[in-house]
Image (cartoon, rainbow, N blue to C red):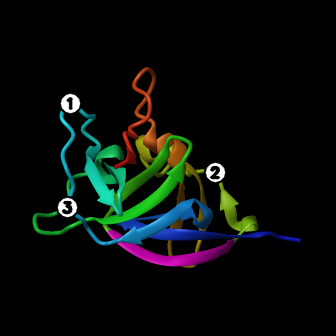
């Protein structure tokens, strides 16, 4: 029997990403955040979400993409990771999709190296690829740097 998986999907430019639904706490529109001095450049700031302080990661910066056009505000996809709860800043939230495991493949060589390192694989859909984001790798900044999470309670 073929198993289906559900993903919360979103866009970054023309790339279509998904995160497993069970790892998503919530999604919401842009919210003001507090800058963190000396934080890695991908850390956009901290968000106070009903008393919980959450690190916001600029997913465009993490993937080496250009910044959003002036005046366009990112959306938040709040995910649970081993390091804690983190907000991924994305261009646009899409739907929850259910896909068949039989359509899962390794990341193709046609996507850039940084993106390929941060995706678990892809699902071929009718008119596009759904790239499955590895949230654990995404919140880690590399050897010796550790995770970007500085979240806590106030």
Which residue occupies 24% across, 65% down? 31
**Circle nearer the viewer, 1 or 2:** 1
Residue receiving disc 2: 106
Pick whichever of labels 2 and 3 is earlier in the sequence.
Answer: 3
| Secondary structure that dominates the magenta span | strand
The verdict on residue 122 being magenta is: no
Q: How far is disc 1 from disc 2 in space, using C-alphas? A: 36 Å
Which residue occupies 35% across, 63% down? 50
**Circle nearer the viewer, 2 or 3:** 3
Element class at badge 2: loop
Label 1–label 3 contact, CB within 8 A: no
Which residue occupies 52% across, 63% down? 24
How crowded pointer 1 is (Cα within 10 Å; few <14, some 14-19, many 20+) is rated as few
Which span of residues is magenta-colored? Answer: 92-99
Of residue 54 and residue 81, the one placed in the foreground of this image is 54
Q: Residue 82 carries which label?
A: none
Residue 146, quarter of picture:
top left
Residue 40, quarter of picture:
top left
Label 1–label 2 contact, CB within 8 A: no
Element class at badge 1: loop
Q: How far is disc 2 from disc 3 in space, using C-alphas? A: 37 Å
**Position of residue 39 in the picture relative to residue 133 (left or right):** left
Which residue occupies 54% across, 77% down? 96
Of residue 65 and residue 145, the one placed in the foreground of this image is 145
Residue receiving disc 1: 38
Work out which residue is located at the far right of the displayed protein and give it.
1
Pick whichever of labels 1 and 3 is earlier in the sequence.
Answer: 3
Residue receiving disc 3: 32
Q: Is residue 18 visible?
A: no
Residue 1, given in percent of the width and then of the height, sits at 89, 71
């Amino acid at each position: 029997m073929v198993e289906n998986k559900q993903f919360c999907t979103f866009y970054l430019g023309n790339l279509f990403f998904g995160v497993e639904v069970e790892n998503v706490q919530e999604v919401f529109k842009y919210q003001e955040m507090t800058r963190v001095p000396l934080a890695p450049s991908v850390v956009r700031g901290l968000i106070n979400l009903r008393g919980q302080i959450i690190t916001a990661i600029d997913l465009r910066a993490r993937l080496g993409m250009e910044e959003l056009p002036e005046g366009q505000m990112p959306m938040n996809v709040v995910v649970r990771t081993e390091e804690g709860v983190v907000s991924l800043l994305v261009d646009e939230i899409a739907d929850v999709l259910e896909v068949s495991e039989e359509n899962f493949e390794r990341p193709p060589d046609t996507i850039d190296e940084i993106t390929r390192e941060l995706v678990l694989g892809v699902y071929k859909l009718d008119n596009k690829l759904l790239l499955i984001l590895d949230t654990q790798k995404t919140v880690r900044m590399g050897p010796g740097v550790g995770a970007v999470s500085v979240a806590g309670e106030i």
